[in-house]
Amino acid sequence: MAAVDSEAVLERREFFPRGLVQPASGYRFSLDSLLLACFAHAGRRQTGADLGCGCGVVGIGMALRQPDLRIVGIDVNADSIRAAAENSVNLHLIDKLTFECADVADWRPEKVLDFVVANPPYRDLSTGRASRGEDRRTARFEERSTFAGFARCAAVALKTRGRFAFVHLPERLPELLSGLADNGLAPKRMRLVHGRAQEGARMVLVEAVKAGAPGLVVEPPLILHKGRGRQTRLTRQALDFCPFLACNTGEAE
């Protein structure tokens, strides 16, 4: 086995998510995945799954924040799985992360899990602008699996009181909450994400608990940016919530 270049690994981790390998024809990850990695809660030494993992960014982010986790990434796209595995090697996380090429409609873990995270396709096939290429279309649109399919997979995979965290569109909240309820998942935390303070929410982060008691906490809104054009900067709130964002845009004010 080749020796590990510790300095190179530390540099890659410091500048994560810069330099991640991504399939040339696949969907490119965005800040929603980074936000989810920082929103999701996991206890010490817990085991979980990242459904629709893509190049592995959510699981990698969680493992960098909490090195005692074990996470399996699931994606139907073989190129994404290969990229995710390569990223785990480059960041020396192969003892934390594993990856399987599978469809969430069929996948089941060998043992029940403590947590599940997912950044599922956001849009119904009848809405939104079509993506170029089948892989990108599958990642953006509910062509192979709906949110209900992701929720069903999470519910089967989780132990009782296990947590399911995901990111999605606020406009689909009624449908999302219905999908959770249909699968015995009780929403417990919610946070709306706004591009700027005076703009409507562009994303919603939700955490549900399997067989959880009723009671939803709506956390303070997360405001990402201030300023316009070349004056756009991350807010201090955004950077405190998700330090990984510092590699993507201007410094916080």
Image (spheres, rainbow, N blue to C red):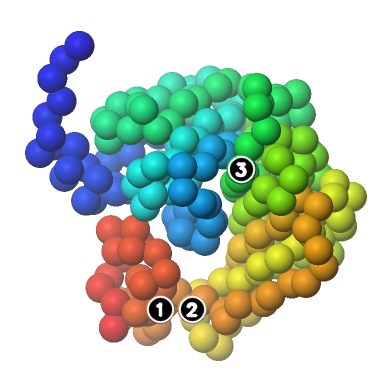
At which x and y percent is residue 26? Answer: 50, 33
Marks 1 & 2, CB-CB < 8 Å contact: yes
Nearer the observer, disc 2 or disc 3? 3
For residue 229, the mark is none
Say which residue appears at 76% left-offset and 29% top-offset: 105
Q: Residues within 10 Å of mark 3 (few under 14, many from 20)?
A: many
| Residue picked out by circle 1 | 237
Amino acid type of the residue that numbered disc 3 sits on in the rendered structure: Asp
At which x and y percent is residue 59? Answer: 46, 42
Residue 47 vertical position relative to residue 217 in the rendered view, above or below? above
Q: Tag 1, which secondary structure?
A: helix
Q: Is residue 69 visible?
A: yes
Judge left or right: residue 86 versus residue 119: left
Q: Which circle's residue, 3 or 1, is located before the other in the chain?
A: 3
Nearer the observer, disc 1 or disc 2? 1
Spatial CA distance of label 3 from label 1 is 29 Å
Marks 2 & 3, CB-CB < 8 Å contact: no
Amino acid type of the residue that numbered disc 1 sits on in the rendered structure: Gln
